Amino acid sequence: MSIISVNNGYDILDDDNILDNDNKNFLSNIKNKNALFACVLSTIETTKYLPISGVNKSVIEYTPAADMELVVLGESLSLKSPPIDATMCPSPATITRANVHLKNIPVLTIDAGSAIKPKIPSPYILIDKIPTGDIYKGLAMKDSKGLFEMGRKIGKYIGENMPLDVLIIGECVPGGTTSALGVLLGLGYDAKNKVSSGSVNNPVELKLKVVENGLRNAKSKDVFDILNAVGDKMMPVVAGMVFSLTKLKKFIILAGGTQMASVLSIIKEIDEKYLKENILDLGYLSLGTTEFVLNDKNSDLKGIIEQINENIPVYASKFNYEKSKIPGLRAYCKGSVKEGVGAGGISLYSYVNGLSPEDIRNYIENNYSKWYGSE
């Protein structure tokens, strides 16, 4: 498997690997094609009392709403400013907003249990009013299979009724790297010390404690029981969407890091046990993340993906934030935030279709004072 760094061109980061034909084909298949960005939201009850997310506890329930307001409207309404972490590193929604605005990419918001509902116009699909539950207690959700089927219906509707060739699927689930760890471990993958974090200091031991306790309460090792115990509601929804969209021969970028890797593991398990469609081998699916996830020394995205399916192309978008005049953007290079709201995957599409990291960085720098009040 080759992991490719995308910077308005394709620089191979892995010297031992070459850019294979599948990767070349996927990139050519998303060039000059219509795209839709869909972002699936949820919040996790565990984050109310355990610091498994890098987002401040006082605003964590508002984060998905504020992020999507920024992406869709160009400003956050649920918070005074878009989310920002303790290092003054701004939300990755700023990256997504830049892409959406500069490339005129339509946005679909899918709410799978956000505590605060975003103040945005249609298209907005509310799947579940109730947030993801307490993964520490193994009570993430009651009906992951029903959410998977809902995801299949949404994917079928999108693929048949919207003018798109490429679907970029992002997520906004604070604490979602912990649920990702739980699902990967529950399905038997070697994921300890390999899952990334939105924090500079990844709370590895706490995350492991949470998911190990939650997994003890799983009814079985079936994928849907694992999801019901320690997953988050974004996961089965996205997995269902992928099955339908692949059948309709749409190209899909799973936009994220280890959270989307966990979705791949769910897709593989459901496919092998229930549906027998071999969708991971058909060439319609890729994973697009950021250079910050790829460079995270405390995780191993490549190792996780290789365990799931070596044929899934993985791309990492560059941003050259080390050149930024804004300290908050430079904080990304030191390990803050890293990814979210589809930032890496939507940038992959934009770079293949003409944007550069400088276009995105300049857009964010030019709007930074409007969003945050000052540099």
Image (cartoon, grey):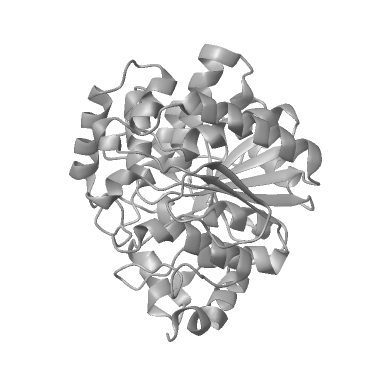
Q: Nearer the viewer, residue 145 or 206?
A: 145
Residue 123 in percent (x, y) is at: 68, 53
Residue 150 seen from this side: yes
Residue 317 in percent (x, y) is at: 54, 56
Residue visible at 50% across and 78% down in the picture? 371
Q: In the rendered view, tell whether residue 335 sits above or below residue 181.
A: below
Residue 283 seen from this side: no
Residue visible at 33% across and 61% down in the picture? 335
Q: Nearer the viewer, residue 67 or 308?
A: 67
Residue 180 in percent (x, y) is at: 38, 38
Would you identify the image quadrant in which residue 96 lies? bottom right
Residue 26 in percent (x, y) is at: 69, 40
Direction front: furthest residue: 129
Residue visible at 24% across and 56% down in the picture? 201
Would you identify the image quadrant in which residue 28 lies? top right
User: Left or right: where does residue 9 sit relative to residue 290?
Assistant: right
How many marks are shown on the rendered structure?
Answer: 0
Q: Give the position of the C terminus as an image quadrant.
A: bottom left
Q: In the rendered view, tell whether residue 360 sits above or below residue 114.
A: below
